[in-house]
Image (cartoon, rainbow, N blue to C red):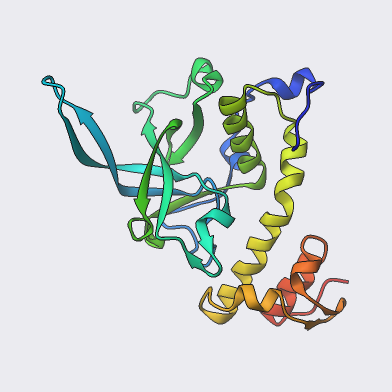
Amino acid sequence: MVGADDEPAKDQEWTPLQPAELYLVRGDPVPSARPFFQGDIFRDVPVPYVERSADGSLSAHVYTNTVMVMPHPCSCYHGDDLRPRLTVASIEPVPTGQRITSVQWRTLNYFPLPEVRDSQDGIADIGELATVPTDALPAERRIACLSLIGVAWLHKRILKYTTRRRWLISNLEAELLAQWEDVEVWQSWIRAKGTPQGYESWKRSIVTVAGVGDVKPQDVIPGRTPHLIAHLEGVAPPE
């Protein structure tokens, strides 16, 4: 487990991230070839919740909201297929004309999202989660994906909220790298093949990759990711 009791003071701060740092891509929608990743943001998702009435009875309801996908990619997929249900955190918009406050940046169950939709800020509450069917998360409703450092900061916030321990952002980013590059290769597979199917078996098989040789792709991620992407996209490998 990656942790740091001697974490530098500068890394203990919840430094507000600029949108260019926080997001890999934003749009409505973002490119559909990218597989689901932790921190992906979807609009107009039906979210279930349970309410207690004045007489003490419970009733189930559904409201529509913007949400963030919470599971690690390995928990989003079973092989090449999305799992039937995923856990999400609702994202509440900051009132128009206002910005995320310093208090909100420091609140442990909040993951602030500056300019998450157009120019409006939002806040994901990682302490209030719900489970939704994956068919409620269609590609055309995905409006943002976090960057590598953005996902690392999401991990840092989740870990601080759930364990109260300090964690080095550099260590969290390093732990994420292999999974991040795996998804980049899978994205190239989807672009090349038009389907996510077959990727898991391909990366476990012996493939002849220019500039690398005969390898199992999974054994050279990370490290030779650019060569694998070039192989899938039919372009010259990097020198």
Q: Position of residue 83 (x, y in %)?
A: 45, 60
Q: Position of residue 71 (x, y in %)?
A: 52, 47
In this rendering, the answer to whether 41 lies above or below 170 is: below
* Quarter of the figure with residue 205: bottom right
* Quarter of the figure with residue 52: top left
Residue drawn where x is 58% and y is 79% of the image:
198
Q: Position of residue 180 (x, y in %)?
A: 67, 55
Q: Position of residue 232 (x, y in %)?
A: 68, 78
Residue drawn where x is 15% and y is 24% of the image:
53
Residue drawn where x is 75% and y is 21% of the image:
10
Q: Residue furthest top?
A: 103
Q: Quadrant of the C terminus?
A: bottom right
Relative to 90, 205 lies left or right? right
In this rendering, the answer to whether 14 lies above or below 207 is: above
How many callouts does the rendering have?
Answer: 0
Residue drawn where x is 47% and y is 63% of the image:
82
Q: Nearer the viewer, residue 3 or 191?
A: 3
Q: Nearer the viewer, residue 13 or 136?
A: 136
Relative to 89, 172 lies left or right? right
Q: Nearer the viewer, residue 166 or 13?
A: 166
Q: Quadrant of the N terminus?
A: top right
